[in-house]
Image (spheres, rainbow, N blue to C red):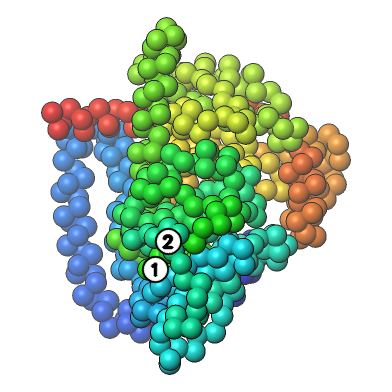
Amino acid sequence: MVQYQRLIIHHGRKEEKFRVSAEESDGGGCYSKRAKQKFRCLLFLSILSCCFVMSPYYLFGFSTLSLLDSFRREIEGLSSYEPFITPLCSEISNGTICCDRTGLRSDICVMKGDIRTNSASSSIFLFTSSTKNNTKPEKIKPYTRKWETSVMDTVQELNLITKDSNSSSDRVCDVYHDVPAVFFSTGGYTGNVYHEFNDGIIPLFITSQHYNKKVVFVIVEYHDWWEMKYGDIVSQLSDYPLVDFSGDARTHCFKEATVGLRIHDELTVNSSLVIGNQTIVDFRNVLDRGYTHRIQSLIQEETEANVTALDFKKKPKLVILSRNGSSRAILNENLLVELAEETGFNVEVLRPQKTTEMARIYRSLNTSDVMIGVHGAAMTHFLFLKPKTVFIQIIPLGTDWAAETYYGEPAKKLGLKYIGYKIAPKESSLYEEYGKDDPIIRDPDSLNDKGWEYTKKIYLQGQNVKLDLRRFRETLTRSYDFSIRRRFREDYLLHRED
Protein backbone atom coordinates (compact mmCIF):
# COMPACT_ATOMS: atom_id res chain seq x y z
CA MET A 1 0.00 0.00 0.00
CA VAL A 2 2.81 2.42 0.77
CA GLN A 3 4.33 1.81 -2.64
CA TYR A 4 0.96 2.38 -4.28
CA GLN A 5 0.46 5.70 -2.48
CA ARG A 6 3.89 6.83 -3.57
CA LEU A 7 3.09 5.92 -7.17
CA ILE A 8 -0.21 7.73 -7.04
CA ILE A 9 1.42 10.92 -5.85
CA HIS A 10 3.97 10.92 -8.63
CA HIS A 11 2.15 9.24 -11.51
CA GLY A 12 -1.51 9.56 -10.73
CA ARG A 13 -3.57 8.31 -13.64
CA LYS A 14 -1.38 5.34 -14.55
CA GLU A 15 -1.85 3.45 -11.29
CA GLU A 16 -5.65 3.54 -11.08
CA LYS A 17 -6.01 0.02 -12.54
CA PHE A 18 -3.46 -1.32 -10.05
CA ARG A 19 -5.52 -0.04 -7.18
CA VAL A 20 -8.71 -1.67 -8.40
CA SER A 21 -7.09 -5.03 -9.01
CA ALA A 22 -5.44 -5.04 -5.60
CA GLU A 23 -8.69 -4.28 -3.80
CA GLU A 24 -10.79 -6.72 -5.79
CA SER A 25 -8.42 -9.66 -5.29
CA ASP A 26 -8.89 -9.70 -1.51
CA GLY A 27 -11.14 -12.21 0.25
CA GLY A 28 -12.30 -14.40 -2.65
CA GLY A 29 -12.45 -17.64 -0.65
CA CYS A 30 -14.60 -16.23 2.13
CA TYR A 31 -17.09 -14.95 -0.38
CA SER A 32 -17.85 -18.36 -1.90
CA LYS A 33 -18.54 -19.91 1.50
CA ARG A 34 -20.97 -17.23 2.56
CA ALA A 35 -22.62 -16.39 -0.74
CA LYS A 36 -25.96 -18.03 0.01
CA GLN A 37 -26.22 -16.40 3.43
CA LYS A 38 -25.37 -12.99 2.01
CA PHE A 39 -27.90 -13.44 -0.78
CA ARG A 40 -30.70 -14.14 1.70
CA CYS A 41 -29.74 -11.08 3.76
CA LEU A 42 -29.58 -8.86 0.70
CA LEU A 43 -32.93 -10.14 -0.54
CA PHE A 44 -34.57 -9.39 2.80
CA LEU A 45 -33.01 -5.92 2.98
CA SER A 46 -34.08 -5.17 -0.59
CA ILE A 47 -37.70 -6.05 0.16
CA LEU A 48 -37.60 -4.00 3.35
CA SER A 49 -36.07 -1.02 1.55
CA CYS A 50 -38.78 -1.16 -1.12
CA CYS A 51 -41.41 -0.78 1.56
CA PHE A 52 -39.87 2.49 2.72
CA VAL A 53 -39.00 3.79 -0.73
CA MET A 54 -42.43 3.12 -2.26
CA SER A 55 -44.38 4.96 0.41
CA PRO A 56 -43.39 8.44 -0.87
CA TYR A 57 -44.31 7.30 -4.38
CA TYR A 58 -47.97 6.92 -3.54
CA LEU A 59 -47.96 10.29 -1.81
CA PHE A 60 -46.05 12.40 -4.32
CA GLY A 61 -45.57 10.50 -7.56
CA PHE A 62 -42.56 9.30 -9.47
CA SER A 63 -40.50 12.53 -9.55
CA THR A 64 -40.43 12.79 -5.78
CA LEU A 65 -39.59 9.11 -5.49
CA SER A 66 -36.59 9.61 -7.76
CA LEU A 67 -35.54 12.67 -5.79
CA LEU A 68 -35.67 10.94 -2.43
CA ASP A 69 -33.83 7.93 -3.79
CA SER A 70 -31.10 10.08 -5.32
CA PHE A 71 -30.51 11.84 -2.03
CA ARG A 72 -30.41 8.49 -0.21
CA ARG A 73 -27.71 7.27 -2.57
CA GLU A 74 -25.72 10.50 -2.22
CA ILE A 75 -25.51 10.40 1.57
CA GLU A 76 -25.41 6.67 2.24
CA GLY A 77 -21.62 6.74 2.15
CA LEU A 78 -21.56 9.22 5.01
CA SER A 79 -23.47 7.03 7.43
CA SER A 80 -21.48 3.83 7.06
CA TYR A 81 -19.69 2.64 10.18
CA GLU A 82 -16.11 1.47 9.85
CA PRO A 83 -14.23 -0.36 12.60
CA PHE A 84 -11.53 1.77 14.21
CA ILE A 85 -7.99 0.74 13.29
CA THR A 86 -5.64 1.47 16.20
CA PRO A 87 -2.58 3.43 14.97
CA LEU A 88 0.94 2.58 16.05
CA CYS A 89 2.21 4.25 19.25
CA SER A 90 -1.33 4.81 20.55
CA GLU A 91 -0.48 2.83 23.69
CA ILE A 92 2.95 3.40 25.26
CA SER A 93 4.31 3.03 28.78
CA ASN A 94 5.46 5.90 30.97
CA GLY A 95 8.98 7.16 30.32
CA THR A 96 9.15 6.08 26.68
CA ILE A 97 9.27 7.54 23.18
CA CYS A 98 7.54 5.74 20.30
CA CYS A 99 7.88 6.86 16.69
CA ASP A 100 5.67 5.65 13.84
CA ARG A 101 7.54 6.17 10.57
CA THR A 102 5.42 3.83 8.45
CA GLY A 103 3.28 6.58 6.92
CA LEU A 104 4.06 7.93 3.48
CA ARG A 105 2.98 11.46 4.31
CA SER A 106 4.12 12.06 7.88
CA ASP A 107 6.05 10.72 10.86
CA ILE A 108 4.46 10.67 14.31
CA CYS A 109 6.28 10.42 17.64
CA VAL A 110 4.54 10.00 20.99
CA MET A 111 6.20 10.76 24.33
CA LYS A 112 4.92 9.96 27.79
CA GLY A 113 6.29 10.94 31.19
CA ASP A 114 8.27 13.97 32.39
CA ILE A 115 8.45 16.04 29.17
CA ARG A 116 10.21 19.40 28.92
CA THR A 117 10.83 21.79 26.02
CA ASN A 118 14.11 23.50 25.18
CA SER A 119 13.61 25.79 22.20
CA ALA A 120 17.23 26.98 22.15
CA SER A 121 18.41 23.50 21.10
CA SER A 122 15.21 22.62 19.17
CA SER A 123 14.74 19.78 21.63
CA ILE A 124 12.05 18.07 23.65
CA PHE A 125 13.45 16.19 26.63
CA LEU A 126 11.94 13.18 28.34
CA PHE A 127 13.32 12.73 31.86
CA THR A 128 13.27 9.25 33.33
CA SER A 129 14.85 7.55 36.33
CA SER A 130 14.66 4.09 34.75
CA THR A 131 18.12 2.50 34.51
CA LYS A 132 16.79 0.11 31.85
CA ASN A 133 15.71 2.83 29.47
CA ASN A 134 18.02 2.84 26.47
CA THR A 135 15.77 4.91 24.21
CA LYS A 136 17.76 6.33 21.30
CA PRO A 137 17.42 10.03 20.43
CA GLU A 138 14.88 10.65 17.69
CA LYS A 139 14.68 13.41 15.10
CA ILE A 140 11.44 14.50 13.48
CA LYS A 141 10.17 17.25 11.21
CA PRO A 142 6.51 17.73 12.27
CA TYR A 143 5.08 18.47 8.82
CA THR A 144 2.86 16.27 6.65
CA ARG A 145 4.73 16.08 3.32
CA LYS A 146 7.68 13.92 4.29
CA TRP A 147 8.04 12.40 0.78
CA GLU A 148 8.71 15.86 -0.68
CA THR A 149 12.38 16.44 0.09
CA SER A 150 12.52 19.96 -1.32
CA VAL A 151 9.94 21.37 1.09
CA MET A 152 10.94 19.18 4.05
CA ASP A 153 14.45 20.65 3.83
CA THR A 154 12.92 23.97 4.86
CA VAL A 155 11.05 22.58 7.90
CA GLN A 156 12.59 22.88 11.35
CA GLU A 157 13.72 19.59 12.86
CA LEU A 158 13.10 18.66 16.49
CA ASN A 159 15.30 16.47 18.68
CA LEU A 160 13.52 14.06 21.03
CA ILE A 161 15.99 13.10 23.76
CA THR A 162 15.76 10.92 26.86
CA LYS A 163 17.66 12.18 29.92
CA ASP A 164 18.45 10.68 33.29
CA SER A 165 16.41 12.62 35.85
CA ASN A 166 18.79 11.63 38.67
CA SER A 167 21.83 13.27 37.11
CA SER A 168 20.25 16.21 35.32
CA SER A 169 20.15 19.72 36.72
CA ASP A 170 18.09 21.35 33.91
CA ARG A 171 14.67 20.20 35.06
CA VAL A 172 13.09 23.52 36.04
CA CYS A 173 9.54 24.03 34.72
CA ASP A 174 8.59 27.59 33.87
CA VAL A 175 5.11 26.59 32.68
CA TYR A 176 3.45 23.35 33.74
CA HIS A 177 0.55 21.99 31.69
CA ASP A 178 -1.77 19.34 33.07
CA VAL A 179 -3.05 18.39 29.59
CA PRO A 180 -1.23 16.75 26.62
CA ALA A 181 0.60 18.66 23.89
CA VAL A 182 0.56 18.37 20.11
CA PHE A 183 3.62 19.76 18.32
CA PHE A 184 3.35 20.68 14.61
CA SER A 185 4.87 23.03 12.06
CA THR A 186 3.20 25.85 10.16
CA GLY A 187 6.17 26.12 7.81
CA GLY A 188 6.48 24.33 4.47
CA TYR A 189 3.80 25.37 2.00
CA THR A 190 1.83 27.35 4.58
CA GLY A 191 0.56 30.47 2.81
CA ASN A 192 -1.42 28.50 0.22
CA VAL A 193 -4.98 27.81 1.35
CA TYR A 194 -5.00 24.25 0.00
CA HIS A 195 -1.88 23.35 1.97
CA GLU A 196 -3.07 25.21 5.05
CA PHE A 197 -6.12 22.95 5.21
CA ASN A 198 -4.74 19.73 3.72
CA ASP A 199 -1.33 19.72 5.41
CA GLY A 200 -2.29 21.50 8.61
CA ILE A 201 -5.83 22.18 9.78
CA ILE A 202 -7.46 18.85 8.85
CA PRO A 203 -4.50 16.78 10.18
CA LEU A 204 -4.68 18.85 13.37
CA PHE A 205 -8.34 17.85 13.72
CA ILE A 206 -7.51 14.20 13.06
CA THR A 207 -4.69 14.18 15.62
CA SER A 208 -6.34 16.15 18.40
CA GLN A 209 -10.13 15.78 18.24
CA HIS A 210 -10.22 12.88 20.74
CA TYR A 211 -8.76 15.16 23.44
CA ASN A 212 -12.06 17.10 23.52
CA LYS A 213 -10.21 20.45 23.53
CA LYS A 214 -8.09 19.49 26.57
CA VAL A 215 -4.82 19.83 24.66
CA VAL A 216 -2.12 22.46 24.10
CA PHE A 217 -0.89 23.17 20.56
CA VAL A 218 2.83 23.94 20.31
CA ILE A 219 3.68 25.47 16.94
CA VAL A 220 7.06 25.15 15.31
CA GLU A 221 7.73 28.02 12.87
CA TYR A 222 4.84 30.02 14.30
CA HIS A 223 3.26 32.91 12.35
CA ASP A 224 1.03 35.61 13.88
CA TRP A 225 -1.06 35.78 10.71
CA TRP A 226 -1.78 32.04 10.84
CA GLU A 227 -3.26 32.34 14.31
CA MET A 228 -5.34 35.35 13.24
CA LYS A 229 -6.58 33.55 10.14
CA TYR A 230 -7.41 30.20 11.75
CA GLY A 231 -7.97 31.15 15.38
CA ASP A 232 -11.73 30.56 15.09
CA ILE A 233 -11.12 26.95 14.03
CA VAL A 234 -8.30 26.29 16.49
CA SER A 235 -10.49 27.52 19.35
CA GLN A 236 -12.84 24.60 18.63
CA LEU A 237 -9.99 22.10 19.01
CA SER A 238 -8.23 23.50 22.08
CA ASP A 239 -9.25 25.50 25.15
CA TYR A 240 -5.68 26.72 25.66
CA PRO A 241 -3.50 29.47 24.13
CA LEU A 242 -1.10 28.48 21.36
CA VAL A 243 2.57 28.13 22.28
CA ASP A 244 5.21 29.54 19.93
CA PHE A 245 7.95 26.92 20.28
CA SER A 246 10.84 29.00 18.96
CA GLY A 247 9.63 32.37 20.18
CA ASP A 248 8.92 31.25 23.76
CA ALA A 249 12.19 30.50 25.59
CA ARG A 250 10.45 29.23 28.70
CA THR A 251 10.50 25.56 29.59
CA HIS A 252 7.04 24.08 29.03
CA CYS A 253 6.34 20.81 30.81
CA PHE A 254 3.86 18.09 29.87
CA LYS A 255 3.01 14.53 30.84
CA GLU A 256 2.23 13.47 27.29
CA ALA A 257 3.05 14.82 23.85
CA THR A 258 2.41 13.96 20.20
CA VAL A 259 4.99 15.36 17.80
CA GLY A 260 3.74 15.56 14.21
CA LEU A 261 0.27 15.28 12.70
CA ARG A 262 -1.62 12.32 11.28
CA ILE A 263 -2.92 12.78 7.74
CA HIS A 264 -5.16 10.43 5.75
CA ASP A 265 -5.72 11.64 2.19
CA GLU A 266 -6.49 14.78 0.22
CA LEU A 267 -8.79 17.10 2.21
CA THR A 268 -10.58 14.27 3.98
CA VAL A 269 -10.86 12.18 7.15
CA ASN A 270 -10.83 8.37 7.11
CA SER A 271 -13.29 7.42 9.85
CA SER A 272 -11.69 4.00 10.33
CA LEU A 273 -8.48 5.70 11.47
CA VAL A 274 -10.04 8.15 13.91
CA ILE A 275 -11.22 7.45 17.44
CA GLY A 276 -15.00 7.78 17.45
CA ASN A 277 -15.23 7.23 13.67
CA GLN A 278 -15.20 10.96 12.94
CA THR A 279 -15.57 11.96 9.27
CA ILE A 280 -14.94 15.03 7.13
CA VAL A 281 -18.53 16.05 7.94
CA ASP A 282 -17.54 16.24 11.62
CA PHE A 283 -14.63 18.46 10.63
CA ARG A 284 -17.01 20.73 8.77
CA ASN A 285 -19.18 20.90 11.90
CA VAL A 286 -16.10 22.28 13.66
CA LEU A 287 -15.96 25.04 11.04
CA ASP A 288 -19.65 25.74 11.63
CA ARG A 289 -19.15 26.15 15.36
CA GLY A 290 -15.98 28.17 14.90
CA TYR A 291 -17.48 30.78 12.59
CA THR A 292 -20.99 31.06 14.07
CA HIS A 293 -20.22 33.84 16.54
CA ARG A 294 -18.34 36.01 14.03
CA ILE A 295 -21.02 35.53 11.37
CA GLN A 296 -23.67 36.70 13.83
CA SER A 297 -21.57 39.83 14.35
CA LEU A 298 -21.33 40.40 10.60
CA ILE A 299 -25.10 40.12 10.26
CA GLN A 300 -25.54 42.60 13.09
CA GLU A 301 -23.12 45.03 11.44
CA GLU A 302 -25.03 44.83 8.16
CA THR A 303 -28.34 45.36 9.94
CA GLU A 304 -27.05 48.48 11.68
CA ALA A 305 -25.65 49.76 8.39
CA ASN A 306 -29.01 49.09 6.63
CA VAL A 307 -27.39 46.76 4.12
CA THR A 308 -30.11 44.97 2.14
CA ALA A 309 -29.33 41.35 1.34
CA LEU A 310 -30.84 39.47 -1.59
CA ASP A 311 -33.84 37.32 -0.82
CA PHE A 312 -32.29 33.90 -1.24
CA LYS A 313 -35.44 32.13 -0.06
CA LYS A 314 -37.09 32.70 -3.41
CA LYS A 315 -34.18 31.76 -5.68
CA PRO A 316 -31.23 29.42 -5.26
CA LYS A 317 -27.95 31.22 -4.61
CA LEU A 318 -24.98 30.62 -6.90
CA VAL A 319 -21.47 31.80 -5.95
CA ILE A 320 -18.76 32.21 -8.57
CA LEU A 321 -15.35 31.94 -6.92
CA SER A 322 -13.45 34.29 -9.16
CA ARG A 323 -9.69 34.01 -9.62
CA ASN A 324 -7.73 37.20 -9.04
CA GLY A 325 -4.51 36.17 -10.78
CA SER A 326 -3.50 36.23 -14.42
CA SER A 327 -4.13 32.53 -15.07
CA ARG A 328 -7.16 30.22 -15.13
CA ALA A 329 -9.52 33.19 -15.13
CA ILE A 330 -12.98 32.95 -16.70
CA LEU A 331 -12.62 35.45 -19.54
CA ASN A 332 -16.38 35.75 -20.14
CA GLU A 333 -17.31 35.83 -16.46
CA ASN A 334 -19.82 38.68 -16.93
CA LEU A 335 -21.72 36.64 -19.52
CA LEU A 336 -21.66 33.66 -17.17
CA VAL A 337 -23.27 35.81 -14.48
CA GLU A 338 -26.01 36.86 -16.91
CA LEU A 339 -26.64 33.24 -17.96
CA ALA A 340 -26.84 32.07 -14.35
CA GLU A 341 -29.34 34.82 -13.56
CA GLU A 342 -31.41 33.88 -16.62
CA THR A 343 -31.40 30.28 -15.39
CA GLY A 344 -33.01 31.42 -12.15
CA PHE A 345 -30.14 31.96 -9.69
CA ASN A 346 -29.29 34.86 -7.47
CA VAL A 347 -25.58 35.29 -8.27
CA GLU A 348 -22.71 36.46 -6.11
CA VAL A 349 -19.18 36.86 -7.48
CA LEU A 350 -16.72 36.20 -4.67
CA ARG A 351 -13.15 37.46 -5.10
CA PRO A 352 -11.28 36.51 -1.93
CA GLN A 353 -7.96 38.20 -1.27
CA LYS A 354 -5.22 36.93 1.04
CA THR A 355 -6.44 39.42 3.61
CA THR A 356 -10.13 38.48 3.30
CA GLU A 357 -11.51 37.29 6.61
CA MET A 358 -12.27 33.57 6.51
CA ALA A 359 -15.59 34.04 8.31
CA ARG A 360 -16.81 36.25 5.45
CA ILE A 361 -15.92 33.61 2.86
CA TYR A 362 -17.51 30.94 5.02
CA ARG A 363 -20.72 32.90 5.40
CA SER A 364 -21.00 33.44 1.64
CA LEU A 365 -20.50 29.78 0.72
CA ASN A 366 -22.37 28.34 3.69
CA THR A 367 -25.53 30.07 2.49
CA SER A 368 -25.12 29.07 -1.16
CA ASP A 369 -26.75 26.33 -3.20
CA VAL A 370 -24.10 26.17 -5.93
CA MET A 371 -20.41 27.10 -6.13
CA ILE A 372 -18.52 27.48 -9.42
CA GLY A 373 -14.77 27.83 -9.73
CA VAL A 374 -11.82 27.01 -11.95
CA HIS A 375 -9.41 24.33 -10.67
CA GLY A 376 -6.87 25.78 -8.26
CA ALA A 377 -6.10 26.16 -4.55
CA ALA A 378 -9.21 28.28 -3.97
CA MET A 379 -11.34 25.19 -4.66
CA THR A 380 -10.39 24.17 -1.11
CA HIS A 381 -13.28 26.38 -0.08
CA PHE A 382 -15.69 23.63 -1.11
CA LEU A 383 -15.24 22.64 2.56
CA PHE A 384 -17.41 25.66 3.38
CA LEU A 385 -20.37 24.35 1.38
CA LYS A 386 -23.17 22.52 3.14
CA PRO A 387 -23.47 18.81 2.31
CA LYS A 388 -25.95 18.12 -0.53
CA THR A 389 -25.22 21.44 -2.26
CA VAL A 390 -23.60 21.65 -5.71
CA PHE A 391 -19.90 22.14 -6.43
CA ILE A 392 -19.02 22.77 -10.10
CA GLN A 393 -15.29 22.61 -10.78
CA ILE A 394 -14.24 23.90 -14.19
CA ILE A 395 -11.36 21.69 -15.31
CA PRO A 396 -8.87 23.33 -17.72
CA LEU A 397 -6.80 21.33 -20.20
CA GLY A 398 -4.11 19.19 -18.61
CA THR A 399 -5.51 19.31 -15.08
CA ASP A 400 -7.97 16.39 -15.14
CA TRP A 401 -6.23 14.11 -12.67
CA ALA A 402 -5.30 16.83 -10.20
CA ALA A 403 -8.78 18.37 -10.28
CA GLU A 404 -10.50 15.08 -9.52
CA THR A 405 -7.95 13.85 -6.97
CA TYR A 406 -7.51 17.00 -4.91
CA TYR A 407 -11.04 18.43 -5.06
CA GLY A 408 -13.53 16.23 -6.91
CA GLU A 409 -13.19 13.05 -4.87
CA PRO A 410 -12.90 14.86 -1.51
CA ALA A 411 -16.02 16.88 -2.36
CA LYS A 412 -18.00 13.68 -2.86
CA LYS A 413 -16.81 12.42 0.53
CA LEU A 414 -18.21 15.59 2.09
CA GLY A 415 -21.58 14.75 0.56
CA LEU A 416 -21.62 17.43 -2.14
CA LYS A 417 -23.22 17.07 -5.54
CA TYR A 418 -19.99 17.33 -7.51
CA ILE A 419 -19.91 18.21 -11.20
CA GLY A 420 -16.58 18.26 -13.01
CA TYR A 421 -16.92 20.43 -16.12
CA LYS A 422 -14.03 19.46 -18.39
CA ILE A 423 -13.51 22.22 -20.92
CA ALA A 424 -13.28 21.51 -24.63
CA PRO A 425 -10.02 22.54 -26.37
CA LYS A 426 -11.69 25.56 -27.94
CA GLU A 427 -12.65 26.84 -24.46
CA SER A 428 -8.96 27.15 -23.54
CA SER A 429 -6.83 30.20 -24.33
CA LEU A 430 -4.10 27.71 -25.30
CA TYR A 431 -6.11 26.70 -28.38
CA GLU A 432 -5.54 30.02 -30.14
CA GLU A 433 -1.93 30.15 -28.98
CA TYR A 434 -0.81 26.68 -30.11
CA GLY A 435 -3.47 25.40 -32.55
CA LYS A 436 -5.54 22.25 -32.50
CA ASP A 437 -2.77 19.89 -33.71
CA ASP A 438 -0.18 20.80 -31.10
CA PRO A 439 0.43 18.09 -28.44
CA ILE A 440 -0.34 20.70 -25.77
CA ILE A 441 -3.92 20.69 -27.05
CA ARG A 442 -4.22 17.23 -28.55
CA ASP A 443 -2.40 15.19 -25.88
CA PRO A 444 -2.00 16.98 -22.52
CA ASP A 445 -0.94 13.71 -20.84
CA SER A 446 2.22 13.62 -22.92
CA LEU A 447 3.18 17.04 -21.57
CA ASN A 448 2.28 16.15 -17.98
CA ASP A 449 4.46 13.06 -18.22
CA LYS A 450 7.48 15.31 -18.72
CA GLY A 451 7.16 16.55 -15.16
CA TRP A 452 5.54 19.04 -12.81
CA GLU A 453 7.36 22.07 -14.20
CA TYR A 454 5.76 21.54 -17.65
CA THR A 455 2.31 21.17 -16.11
CA LYS A 456 2.78 24.24 -13.95
CA LYS A 457 4.13 26.50 -16.69
CA ILE A 458 1.72 25.55 -19.48
CA TYR A 459 -1.54 24.41 -17.91
CA LEU A 460 -1.59 26.21 -14.58
CA GLN A 461 0.24 29.49 -15.18
CA GLY A 462 -0.39 29.94 -18.90
CA GLN A 463 -4.06 29.11 -19.41
CA ASN A 464 -7.35 30.97 -19.15
CA VAL A 465 -10.86 29.78 -19.86
CA LYS A 466 -13.59 31.14 -22.12
CA LEU A 467 -16.68 29.05 -21.50
CA ASP A 468 -18.92 27.84 -24.28
CA LEU A 469 -22.06 29.16 -22.62
CA ARG A 470 -24.39 27.15 -24.83
CA ARG A 471 -22.64 24.02 -23.59
CA PHE A 472 -22.36 25.24 -20.00
CA ARG A 473 -26.08 26.12 -19.89
CA GLU A 474 -26.90 22.43 -19.43
CA THR A 475 -24.68 22.26 -16.34
CA LEU A 476 -26.37 25.33 -14.88
CA THR A 477 -29.84 23.96 -15.61
CA ARG A 478 -29.03 20.63 -13.96
CA SER A 479 -27.66 22.47 -10.92
CA TYR A 480 -30.73 24.71 -10.70
CA ASP A 481 -33.14 21.77 -10.92
CA PHE A 482 -31.15 19.84 -8.33
CA SER A 483 -31.17 22.83 -5.95
CA ILE A 484 -34.92 23.34 -6.31
CA ARG A 485 -35.61 19.66 -5.66
CA ARG A 486 -33.29 19.69 -2.65
CA ARG A 487 -35.15 22.66 -1.18
CA PHE A 488 -38.45 20.93 -1.82
CA ARG A 489 -37.26 17.82 -0.03
CA GLU A 490 -35.92 19.79 2.94
CA ASP A 491 -39.18 21.71 3.25
CA TYR A 492 -41.11 18.45 3.07
CA LEU A 493 -39.02 16.87 5.83
CA LEU A 494 -39.29 20.01 7.93
CA HIS A 495 -43.09 20.16 7.67
CA ARG A 496 -43.36 16.44 8.35
CA GLU A 497 -41.44 16.91 11.62
CA ASP A 498 -43.73 19.81 12.57
Q: Is residue 379 above or below residue 451?
A: above
What is the number of the mark on residue 174? Answer: none
Residue 276, image x and y in percent?
Answer: 29, 60
Task: Identify residue type, mark 2.
Answer: Ala
Which corner quadrant holds the C terminus? top left
Secondary structure, mark 1, is strand
Q: Residue at x 51, y 58 (%)?
A: 250
**In the depicted structure, whether residue 109 falls above or below residue 145:** below
Where is mark 2, residue-wise? 181
Give the residue furthest to the left. Answer: 498
**Nearest to N terminus: mark 2 or mark 1:** 2
Q: Residue at x 85, y 47 (%)?
A: 438
Residue 418, given in percent of the width and then of the height, sits at 48, 42
- Left or right, 444 with respect to 82, comes to right
Q: Is residue 265 visible?
A: no
Residue ID at (50%, 79%): 168
**Is 323 on the left or on the right of 235, as rendered?**
right
Q: Is residue 108 above or below residue 210?
A: below
Q: Amino acid at mark 1?
A: Glu
- Residue 256, label in figure: 1
Q: Position of residue 270 (x, y in %)?
A: 41, 60
